[in-house]
Amino acid sequence: MHSEDPPDWNELGARIKAWGRELGLSAIGIAAVELGAAEAGLTEWLAAGFNGEMDYMARHGAKRARPAELLPGTVSVVTARLVYWPDAANAEAILGDESLAYISRYALGRDYHKVLRNRLEKLAGRIAAEIGPFAYRVFADSAPVLEVELAARSGLGWRGKHTLLLARDAGSTFFLGEIFTNLPLPADAPVSDHCGSCRACISACPTGAIVAPYRLDARRCISYLTIELKGSIPIELRPLIGNRVYGCDDCQLVCPWNRGALLTHEEEFAVRHGLDGARLSELFAWSEAEFQGKTAGSAIRRIGFERWLRNIAVALGNAPATPEVMAALVARRLDASALVREHVAWALGRHGGATVVCRQRHEPL
């Protein structure tokens, strides 16, 4: 219960971490809000055009590095990690079978935005029950926030060369979230970088999007191309996408720190609708109603049906030209969407056109 006396801020910080663990959060840290050095790096990154079509990043600009512009009076940020990697990850096996669709493992279960924000709201409520009302805002990849920077400054890990946060006890397979607050909580000390001379993530990126250590050109990143990009995927990058239809995990899969990464125990992140190993041809045959139904509550839904089909068409173009693959492509060659038709035509062209399926199915186009 709260009283008229001011809280012991050190004790409250320790209790916040304990409450966070009780709520199922993997780790909690506390960061100060002075992000001037990070603001300079963000400005340089935007000036290079590495944000691609993510115009909102340029619009928000320096706001990401100025927490008080999101919540006036912010003096500390409670940061959180929540592990998502599912038991049935089998990532390498799916990537190795070109007839299957690879979906980034974070998107196989319930939309993390909702799950993490809900936990953080409960944590904020627990703080308020202890000390009384206070000013706060909760974020989980839902606003212009330098999440990795804040998490690194709060001791939750260090920024890896792939630009994701890395932790010795959890690798990088976790979500990040924050509570901006006007409480003068004591900041935790950052941890040192443990990447050393390793360049595994840089070498493994299929499209060369990690242009230098700690520097990502989003315009080449498969996660950007399959999720953020609204129009045509650049032709020169399509063959490099392979069977990845939503996001990419390659830089994480090769990272030594992920060899012992924790598995999630969250039922909400359990695989839905067999999407951890579905056949490309089956997904390409979904109607829009099926897409809406089977991605309800999932992060996948945000790209919409048209981009979903666009991505799968590219993957089918990269798959072996089996009768199954060719039939799937021909079935969509007159799709209502010009975007889908364009990518289907490209995929058919990769396989020598639609004449192959004519001979196999003994029917004219």
Image: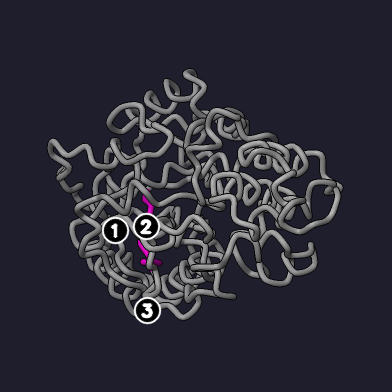
Q: Is label 3 or label 1 in front?
A: 3
**Neighbour tally class for label 2: few under 14, some 14-19, many 20 plus, Cα within 10 Å:** many
Mark 1 sits on what residue? 29
Task: Look at the image and say whether residue 340 sits in the magenta stretch.
Answer: no
Q: Nearer the viewer, residue 101 or 14?
A: 101
- Judged from the image, the secondary structure of the residue bearing numbered disc 2 is strand
Q: Position of residue 303 (x, y in %)?
A: 66, 51
Name the residue tied to disc 3.
265
Query: For the residue carrying disc 1, how many other residues have a C-alpha within 10 Å: few (<14), some (14-19), or many (20+)?
Result: many
What residue span does the magenta drawing correspond to? 76-85
Point out the tag, 2 or 1, that comes first from the N-terminus: 1
Q: Position of residue 152 (x, y in %)?
A: 28, 47
Badge 2 vs badge 1, beta-carbon distance below 8 Å: yes
Say which amino acid is labelled 2. Val
Mark 2 or 3, closer to the camera: 3
Secondary structure state at the residue bearing disc 3: loop
Using the rendered image of the protein, determine whether residue 49 is visible from the camera's viewpoint.
yes
Depth order, front residue of 61/72: 61
